[in-house]
Image (tube, grey):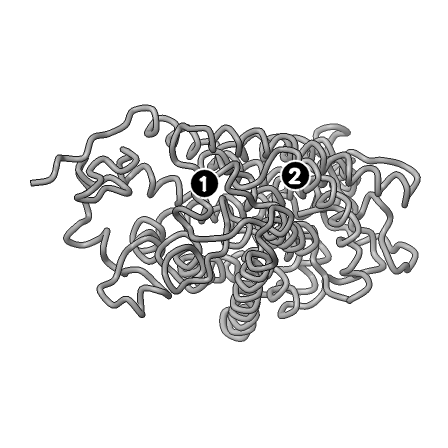
Amino acid sequence: MPEAPAIDPANTVFLLVSTALVLLMTPGLALFYGGLNRSKGVLNMIMMSFSAIGLVSVLWLFYGFSFAFGTSENATVNKFFGSFSQYLGTKTFLGEGDLWGATAENPSGIGVPLYVFMAFQMVFAVITVALISGAISDRTKFAGWLLFAGLWATLVYFPVAHWVWGTGFIGGGDGNIKALDFAGGTAVHINAGAAALGLVLALGKRIGFPTASFKPHNIPLVALGAGLLWFGWFGFNAGSELTVDSVAGLAFINTQVATAAAVLGWIIVEWIRDGKPTVVGASSGAIAGLVAITPACGFIAPWAAVLLGLVAGAVCALAISLKYKLGYDDSLDVVGVHFVGGWIGSLWLGLFATNQVNGAISDVIGASDGLFYGGGVTQLGRQALAGLIVTVFSAGVAFLLAKGIDKTIGFRASQEAEVDGIDIAEHAESGYDLSTAGGSGSAGGAFAMAGIGQSSTPAPAATAAPSSEKVAG
C-alpha cells in the first residue's frame, strides 16, 4: 500500500491566502470598470462582475473543475476536455486523502487538499469571465449577459483551462504544443480579450460612438480598483506556483517590477502624445503590466520583467486607439489591454524564458529556452500557435453565442435604456442619489449631475478620443 498523502501546512496556507487575494480582484475589477464607465451605467458594470462570482463559482463546483482538470480514460479525448463527473456524483465529497498531484510514486504531491486547489482555480475562472464585461458596457441586457457568461465559461474557459493547465494539447507533455503560461496569459487574458472582440463585433457600437463623450465618471474609483487588482494579482501570479519556494518569490518580484515599469511606459507615451500624464493612464498602465507579466512571471529574470513592463505599458497605450481606426466599440478597452497585453506577455516567453530561473521549463513542461537564451525560435513559434488557437476559438464562439442570445432572449438593450441609463432600465436603481442635496425641487438637477436620464453629450469627431477617454479594461 502506498503511503497516505500528507498535508503540507505551508503550501496549503499559501494557496488559501492566494485564493482570497484572487477573489478580491473581481470586486476590484468591478470598481475599476465602474469608475471608467459613465455614471448612469456604473451599477450595471459592478453587477456584471459580482454576478460572475455567483454564477461561475457554482458552475465550477458542479462540473467546471472536472471539465478543466479531470482525467479521461480516452487519451485522445483527454487532449480536449477532462471529465464531466470525476469530482461530482460518486466523488461529491472529497476527503483529506485527495491531494492535488498525489501519486503512488509521490504520495504527498505538493501536499495541498484538492478542495483548496479547486477553490484557487475557481476564482481564476470567475475573473476571466468578469474581464469580458468591460467591452460591452452601456448596451447589454443583464439577462443576456448572465446567459452568455454561463455558456462561454462552459464552452470556452473550462476547455481552454484544460488545454493550457490540465492534460490538454497546449501545455506540456508528449505530443503537445508545449507552450508556456505560468498564470494565465493565454488561458485568461488572450482568452477574455478575444471573447470581448467577438462580442463587440456581434453586438455593435454604442449610440453615439465614436463622437459622443464617454469619459470616466469617477477617476478615484478607477485608481482604487486598479490598486485592489494590483494587490490581488500577487496571489494570482505567485500563487500559481502552488508551493512556497524560490519560483513563487520570482513570480512575486517580477509582478511588482513589471507593473511598476508599465505605469512608467504608459504615462511616458501619454505625456509625449497628449502633453499631460493622467491618473487614468497610470491606472491603465498598471493593468497592462499585470496582464503582460502574468504568463511570464515564473519563467523570466527580473530584468526582463522590467523591460516587458515598459514595452507592454507603451504598446497598450497606443493599442487602445485601434478601436477608433478599425471601428469596433470596445467600451473599456479590454481588447487593447488584455488581448494585446496577453499576446505581448506570451510572446515574450519565446524571447526571454530561461531554465536558469525555472528548471521546470524543460524538466517538467518540455519547453525550450527563449531566443535570447540560445533556444532559437522554437518556443516563440509555440507561443504564437497557442495564442492563435485560443484567439480564433474564443472569439468565434463568443460571436456565435452573442448572435444566438440576441435572436432569442435578447442581448442588446433598447435605445431608450441605453440613452436614459442602463442602471435604471436593468436594475431599477442609480449609483448616486443626490436628491436630498437641494431639496425635492432640485431632484431633477441632481440626477442630471449623476448622468441619470441624460443623453450623451456630443464631442467633436476625431480619429482618436482625448486622453481622458482612452481608458483601459
Q: Relative to 327, is 137 above or below?
A: above
Quarter of image, res 231: top right
Mark whose residue sits in front, 2 or 1: 1
Work out which residue is located at the far left of the displayed protein and give it.
Answer: 1
Q: Quadrant of the N terminus?
A: top left
Quarter of image, res 110: top left
Q: Is residue 59 left or right of residue 236?
A: left
Numbered mark located on residue 183 in the image: none
Q: Relative to 316, is 395 above or below?
A: below
Count of numbered circles on the image: 2
How far across and how far down the image is residue 54, in percent?
42, 46
Q: Is residue 153 left or right of residue 438?
A: left
Numbered mark located on residue 359 in the image: 1
Q: Nearer the viewer, residue 442 or 226?
A: 226
Which badge, 2 or 1, is on the more N-terminal residue?
2
- Where does label 2 land, which residue? 304
Residue type at mark 2?
Answer: Ala
Q: What separation in Å lies between label 2 and label 1 (alpha carbons)?
A: 17 Å
Q: Residue at x 62, y 63 (%)?
A: 413
Q: Secondary structure at mark 1?
A: loop
Camera sees residue 422: no
What crowding class fits label 1: few (fewer than 14 Cα within 10 Å), some (14-19), or many (20 or more)?
A: some
Work out which residue is located at the far front of the displayed protein and give it.
Answer: 374
Q: Residue at x 66, y 68 (%)?
A: 201
Q: Residue at x 54, y 75 (%)?
A: 407
